[in-house]
Amino acid sequence: MFKNAIKTLVLVAACSSLFAQEDNYNVHLWEPGKVPLSVGEGPLDNPFLTVFAPPAAKRNGSAVIIAPGGSNIMLMYGLEGIEVAERMNDWGTVAFVLTYRLSPRYNEAARVLDGNRAMRLVKTRAKEWGIDPNRITFAGFSAGSNMARGVANGAGPGDPNAADPIDRTDSKAHSLVMVYGPGRSNPKENLKEFPPTFLLSAAADPGAANGSAQLFLDINKAGGVAELHIFQRGRHGFGAASTSPEFSPWMDALRHFLDLNNFFARTK
């Protein structure tokens, strides 16, 4: 575990430096010393968003928060972060890659707090980024997909009496994108109230594929909105897969799904 923590620390520090270059920059979810459930003050204890924004003239008011996977011990920033962000930038969407708190220092409760805080922060600062606060999707990969389900289940209207104005904002996403990770079952989930959900996996990744299929059935039976894609071949961890012969169509399918749910409608 100690080696994993050191590996994660190096990755977070390196990517933080990389993201800070050129037009990308980091925004911490909380001020130093105010991170809930924190057990320290280092890079692993202070979650943040990295902003990837298309040119202002290209933006259509949509936004995405991307939670890369990595088994909750590291983050796959490339295939499941930067590449997805840049592809969605091409669609006119402002993208935010989420660096969330990891194991073994933190558990799922901290990660759900990070995800919901990210939603609230982006909504609070929507005008600054040219975003419609009602058109923010949450996309998770593998462990980040599990997190997306927890974020949807933990979404709330905000506390009107909170001292922090960010905490007064609701955290409900416009839609969910869950890639090769169905999330953990929770009998307290109100699947009917989940935002429209896009589920994607490969058949040769049976845990994710079968779990995604079951989650689709559960959402559909509950009266919610979901779309399911399971590729006949492939593996876990394909990410954006822009040039892959097996998986390259998936982001076009996602764009179609989002478009059907008025994600790209220009702000008035």
Image: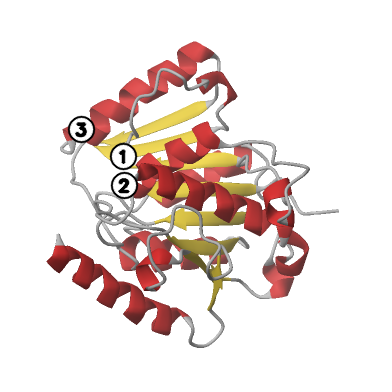
**Secondary structure beneath disc 2?**
helix
Residue 4 % position (x, y): 17, 64
Between the residue at mark 2 and the residue at mark 3, the CA separation in whole angstroms equals 13 Å
* Extreme residue toward the top, this view: 221
**Secondary structure beneath disc 3?**
helix
Answer with left or right where residue 57 lies relative to residue 121. Answer: right
What number is the disc on residue 207? 3
Q: Nearer the viewer, mark 2 or mark 3?
A: 2
Can you tell which quarter of the image residue 245 is in? bottom left
Judging depth in this view, the residue of 125 and 181 nearest the camera is 125
Residue 247 % position (x, y): 29, 50
Mark 2: give few (<14), some (14-19) or many (20+) Cα within 10 Å.
many
Q: Which residue is mark 2?
A: 143
| Residue at 47% across, 11% down | 221
Between the residue at mark 2 and the residue at mark 1, the CA separation in whole angstroms equals 7 Å
- Residues marked 2 and 1 touching at CB (< 8 Å): yes
Res. 62 in view = no
Judging depth in this view, the residue of 164 and 186 nearest the camera is 164
**Secondary structure beneath disc 1?**
loop
Can you tell which quarter of the image residue 160 is in? top right
Q: Quadrant of the N terminus?
A: bottom left
The type of residue carrying mark 3 is: Gly
5 to 158, vertically: above or below: below
Res. 44 in view = yes
228 to 180, vertically: above or below: above
Can you tell which quarter of the image residue 100 is in? bottom left
The type of residue carrying mark 1 is: Gly
Judging depth in this view, the residue of 248 and 161 nearest the camera is 161
- Residues marked 2 and 3 touching at CB (< 8 Å): no
